[in-house]
Amino acid sequence: MRKELWIAIWRFLPIMLLVLLLWVVHVYQWYNNVSFADYGLYPREWIGLRGVVFMPFLHGDFKHLISNSIPLLVLGGGLTYFYPTLYKKVIFWIIVAGGFWLWLGGRSSYHIGASGLVYGLSSFLFFSGFLRKDLRLMALSMLVVFLYGGMVWGILPLIKEVSWEGHLFGGLAGALMAWVYRTDGPQRKQYVWDLEEEDEDEDDAYWNPPDNPVANQPQRITYIYQPQNNQSEGKKDEEN
């Protein structure tokens, strides 16, 4: 039990450090009365591309920061615990792909916040569990729906001040990563009856007889000796 607890803490540590970094950046801005919002993502402006990297670490106020920190801890913790070999790639590509798509298709305004990453993690965990057909991961998917199912409204242009495009592209990036890495990381356990069902589909299984056993056997040629007299008599009979 103690070993499992330490493993869980160790796997949860990266996402805790990520959220801590978000708080350090925002507290620094608040304490020094400065704003790094200009480092946010500005669509279709070359300088705005830097926001692909900086956008997740910038927030408008503490309320904005808290609203992203809690789901990041929950969803990110699930990612790092169940996908310990994949979480770095998933987080990286959600940020890069989602941010780049936002740069291409977002409104002409500065976009800041880790909401795109939150939507990406939610989408990845949801689709990955069902693609892998693993009971634990499917249960995690349903938990995500139960806790954050209302997030689906965030991808609609209902509130002008909210970057719904960032939510949408982040969610699409998470779904894409679930498909790309569907064969990596944890997989559904194979049971004996699963293997038996797979064997039944094999045509060359030892219990399946061949379709034409005679055709598969080597051909034999039989020589029949016929005396010369019999052959002559046969010719006479044919002439008559």
Image (spheres, rainbow, N blue to C red):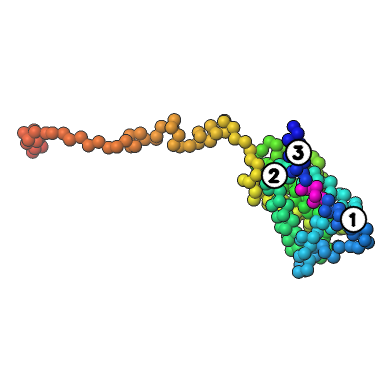
Identify residue for label 2: 83
Q: Amino acid at mark 3?
A: Trp
Residue 171 can be seen, yes or no: no
Q: Is residue 123 left or right of residue 228?
A: right
Of residues 106 and 177, which is closer to you in this image?
Answer: 177
Q: Quadrant of residue 75?
A: top right
Q: Is residue 89 above or below residue 191?
A: below
As helix, strand or loop, the secondary structure at mark 1 comes to: helix
Quadrant holding the N terminus: top right
Of residues 239 and 77, which is closer to you in this image?
Answer: 77
* Mark 3 vs 1, N-terminal side: 3
As helix, strand or loop, the secondary structure at mark 3 comes to: helix
Q: Is residue 23 left or right of residue 53?
A: right
Residue count near mark 3 (Cα–Cα under 10 Å), binned few <14, some 14–19, many ≥20: few
**What is the x, y in percent for residue 121?**
75, 48
* Mark 2 vs 3, N-terminal side: 3
Q: Quadrant of residue 34?
A: bottom right
